[in-house]
Image (tube, rainbow, N blue to C red):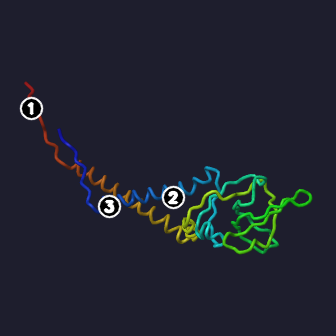
């Protein structure tokens, strides 16, 4: 009975295979981390300013849960677009410090960054039925998303692991083909007794 031995891999090949596996696991985990919040009903925002320093720092990721506007209260930290008259064109993540109902039932809010000495100079009303409220933050992780917004970095981060995985697959395929050819060209030893036919 003959035994087939798989060719022993060199230490460099084993290390390379381990690195490829590690990169694949990290890429999978990154993909899950990117998609998971939306699966659980959360929205994700990267904090790019320092107005909430002390509560969460610049570069943090804020995970926000949409809640009915009627459930908002003073103390909630929300992400919203200030009114056009404010001159601010980007989203702001600040804490509600004033909540006033005007004549006619119009609800007017005012916010303030925890690190700012004064409330924001604008007041506003929310027109949608729901508003994202900060529930959790992860410090510094937002810098990854900021970096990935750059096309060249994104191509490098995605392209290099993909190229390494493709290269490793080609090496394994070539090794398997080579092992198969060697197996075919190896002489087969005959075992047992010869059969003699009588005339």
The residue where tag 1 is placed is: 193
Q: Quadrant of residue 133?
A: bottom right
Secondary structure beneath label 2 = helix
Towards the viewer: 169 or 11: 11
> Measuring 34% from the left and 61% from the top, which residue is drawn there?
16
The residue where tag 3 is placed is: 15
> Measuring 83% from the left and 61% from the top, which residue is drawn there?
100
Towards the viewer: 24 or 68: 68
Which is more N-terminal, label 3 or label 1? 3
Quadrant housing the C terminus: top left
Residue 193, horizontal then vertical, whole percent: 9, 32
> Measuring 16% from the left and 46% from the top, which residue is drawn there?
187
Label 3 crowding class (10 Å Cα cut-off): few <14, some 14-19, many 20+? few
Q: Quadrant of residue 104?
A: bottom right
Residue 95: numbered disc: none
Label 1 crowding class (10 Å Cα cut-off): few <14, some 14-19, many 20+? few
> Measuring 52% from the left and 67% from the top, which residue is drawn there?
155
Taking 193 as reference, is 70 above or below it? below
Residue 71, horizontal then vertical, whole percent: 76, 52
Task: For marks 1 and 3, give the CA distance.
Answer: 48 Å
The residue where tag 2 is placed is: 30
Taking 197 as reference, is 175 above or below it? below
Label 2 crowding class (10 Å Cα cut-off): few <14, some 14-19, many 20+? few
Which is more N-terminal, label 2 or label 3? 3
In the figure, is residue 108 to the left or right of 26? right
Towards the viewer: 98 or 30: 98
In the figure, is residue 36 to the left or right of 118? left
Q: Quadrant of residue 130?
A: bottom right
């Amino acid at each position: 009975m003959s035994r087939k031995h798989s060719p022993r891999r060199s230490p460099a090949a084993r290390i390379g295979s381990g690195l490829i596996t590690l990169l694949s696991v990290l890429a999978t985990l990154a993909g899950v981390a990117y998609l998971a919040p939306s699966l659980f009903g959360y929205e994700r925002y990267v904090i790019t300013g320092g107005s909430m320093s002390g509560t969460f720092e610049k570069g943090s990721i804020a995970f926000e849960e949409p809640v009915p506007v009627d459930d908002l209260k003073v103390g909630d930290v929300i992400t919203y677009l200030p009114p056009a008259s404010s001159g601010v064109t980007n989203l702001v993540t600040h804490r509600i410090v004033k909540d006033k109902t005007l004549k006619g039932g119009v609800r007017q809010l005012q916010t303030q960054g925890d690190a700012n000495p004064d409330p924001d100079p604008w007041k506003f009303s929310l027109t949608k039925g729901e508003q994202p409220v900060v529930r959790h933050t992860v410090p510094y992780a937002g810098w990854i998303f900021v970096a990935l917004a750059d096309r060249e970095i994104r191509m490098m981060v995605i392209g290099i692991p993909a190229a390494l995985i493709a290269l490793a697959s080609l090496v394994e395929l070539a090794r398997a083909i080579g092992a198969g050819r060697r197996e075919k060209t190896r002489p087969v030893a005959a075992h047992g007794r010869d059969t003699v036919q009588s005339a």
